[in-house]
Image: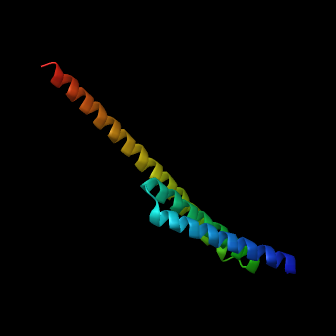
Amino acid sequence: MSIAITIIHGIAMVLLVAAAGFALYRMAHGPTSLDRSVASDVIIAVLIAATGLYTVTSGNAFGMPVLVVLSLLGFTAAVGMARLISNRSDQVRTLHEARRHHEDGGHHD
């Protein structure tokens, strides 16, 4: 492997570590659960990229099944969080409508 490719792999690894560090910070200090969810998705994406980089660098096919599992994990986590947020917004909307209906009914008595 040439020195240029080794340097590029090293730069890519440094950038992946930096991205993981920023995502971990957001996961720990994020003001909302949505920030933490996005940070966990970013961490999974960084793990996928790091595994892909390892697979390419080493020439070993061991990383391929790991990539598939991480991809499925990232997809299901994103879909699960989207459903959770959707259900939560539906519940909030229903509560607001019920409160509005209750307030309207109470003022007419």
**Which residue is outermost to the left?**
109
Residue 25 horizontal side relative to residue 95, left or right: right
Please say if 62 is above or below 106. below
| Position of residue 51 measured from the top left corner of the image (x, y, whole percent) | 65, 72
Q: Residue at x 46, y 64 (%)?
A: 29
Answer whether residue 67 is visible to the viewer in this image: no
**Which residue is outermost to the top?**
108
> To which quarter of the image does residue 100 belong?
top left
| Position of residue 19 measured from the top left corner of the image (x, y, whole percent) | 62, 66
Please say if 6 is above or below 77. below
Q: Which quarter shows the N terminus?
A: bottom right
Residue 85 horizontal side relative to residue 24, left or right: left
Answer whether residue 84 is visible to the viewer in this image: yes
| Position of residue 15 measured from the top left corner of the image (x, y, whole percent) | 68, 69
Q: Residue at x 66, y 77 (%)?
A: 62
Q: Residue at x 80, y 79 (%)?
A: 6
> To which quarter of the image does residue 18 belong?
bottom right
Scheme of colours in the image: rainbow
| Position of residue 103 measured from the top left corner of the image (x, y, whole percent) | 21, 27
Q: Which quarter shows the C terminus?
A: top left
- Choose between 68 and 109: the one closer to the eye: 109
Q: Residue at x 69, y 74 (%)?
A: 14
Residue 99 horizontal side relative to residue 84, left or right: left
